[in-house]
Structure formats: structure tokens, C-alpha cells
Amino acid sequence: KAGVTQTPRYLIKTRGQQVTLSCSPISGHRSVSWYQQTPGQGLQFLFEYFSETQRNKGNFPGRFSGRQFSNSRSEMNVSTLELGDSALYLCASSLDPGSAYEQYFGPGTRLTVT
Amino acid sequence: SQQGEEDPQALSIQEGENATMNCSYKTSINNLQWYRQNSGRGLVHLILIRSNEREKHSGRLRVTLDTSKKSSSLLITASRAADTASYFCATSSQGGSEKLVFGKGTKLTVNP
């Protein structure tokens, strides 16, 4: 079974631009979560999607948004990029939502904002 | 805010030695999970332990959970250079939104 894939793997953007990251979950997994990882703040939960609906949201500004498609693939968007948005963005999929299920992580998208 | 806090922040040992990492958390949990991350890559799930369990094993890994002390430990026995990675605990709070909250991790270095 193919693992979680994320595209692109690396991205360089300038302040004020917007960016869209993509995540394809493991086949059969219906829940997708997104995390931001930085050296200072560690791993922080962004949001969780299930059945094309946002089920949970972390404490991030409205510039961060996401969506899930009917095939469970997910995208996240960050608008009006700031320098502080530079981070590794990780996507994780699980069979179903909720913390009872282990999450399978993708390799991440390394975003650099200049 | 971080729910789980790992201790120590960094640990350096020789191959063959055991490595113990601890995780403390603040509120009652549904379960606690441990993940490993190799440098700059995605996380790999290691073990999930439920709040009504006290100990779980998986190969060279042993996890304990003490809900009265709100703490967990991860023991890696007979460590190998390939175990070099960062290890994170993640908790899900009872009565909460079920989202996983990760600690800042323990960076383990196993020297050959």
C-alpha cells in the first residue's frame, strides 16, 4: 500500500503570496490531519478533515484553511504568507477520525517564506 | 500550549545501551501515543497506550503509563545507531476535541 504523499516537497515563497499544499492519504483512510512543525513551537495541530468536513481546528489564524475532497485527498492553503509561516507542514491520515487511531504521516512539505 | 512534555530534551548513548524517555502531561487523557521522527522527515507511529493500560511492548520498545502521575515512559532496549531520531509523545484529552497534542520531543543520538 502506498504511504501518505505530499506535494510539493519543498517550496519557496515571498511574503504576501499564498500557497496551496496537497496531501493524498493512504488508500482507505478517510481522515486527514495537518500539522505545522517549527523549531520554536514544535508540532502544532492545524486541522482535521473527515468526509469533506472540518472536524477539528487548531489555534491558527484564518489565513490557514483547508479542504477535503470526496476521494479523501486534502489541500491546505495559507494566504498572505508571513515569515513566521516558514515551517515543515505535515499531513497525516488515519482510518477514521479521533485519537484512537494511529496516524500515518507523509514526508512533509518544507515551506520557506522570504 | 503543549499537553505532553518530554524529558530529557536530548539524550546521547552508546549502541547496545538502553534509552529511556519520559513524557508528562497535564489533563486526563483518552490515550497516549509515541512517534519517532528522523531528521526533517515525517513521523512514524510507534505505540498507542490507552488510559486503562499500564504497559505495552512492541519489539525492543516498552511503554508504561502512570495516570496517577500523569506520565509515560518509552524504553528502547539494546539501542542501535538506526534508533537515532526525535521521539514525541502525543496525547488526546478526555472530554476534549480528540485532536492529538504533541510534546516538543526528545532528541536521541545513539553512537556506534
Image: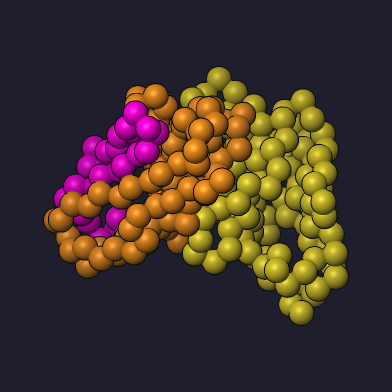
Chain colours: A orange, B yellow
Tell me if I can see residue A45 in this picture: no
Q: Residue furthest top?
A: B95
Q: Position of residue A25 (x, y in %)?
A: 45, 41
Residue extent of the magenta highlight: A62-86
- Residue B102, above or below A110: above
Please name the residue shown 44% across and 38% down the image: A33
Q: Residue furthest bottom?
A: B112
Q: Position of residue A68 (x, y in %)?
A: 33, 33
Which residue is at the front of the view, B52 or A1? A1
Q: Position of residue B104 (x, y in %)?
A: 55, 53
Tally of numbered discs: 0
Please name the residue shown 22% across and 67% down the image: A114
Q: Which residue lies furthest to the front in this view?
A: A1
Would you identify the image quadrant in which residue A77 lies? Answer: top left
Please name the residue shown 55% across and 20% down the image: B95
Tell me if I can see residue A23 in this picture: yes
Whether B37 is among the magenta residues is no
Whether A65 is among the magenta residues is yes
Which residue is at the front of the view, A48 or A9? A9
Instruction: Specify whether B7 is left or right of A68.
Output: right
Q: Where is residue B79 in the image (x, y as percent from the top left)?
A: 80, 66
Please name the residue shown 43% across and 56% down the image: A108
Instruction: Specify whether B78 is left or right of A79.
Output: right
- Quarter holding the C terminus of chain B is bottom right
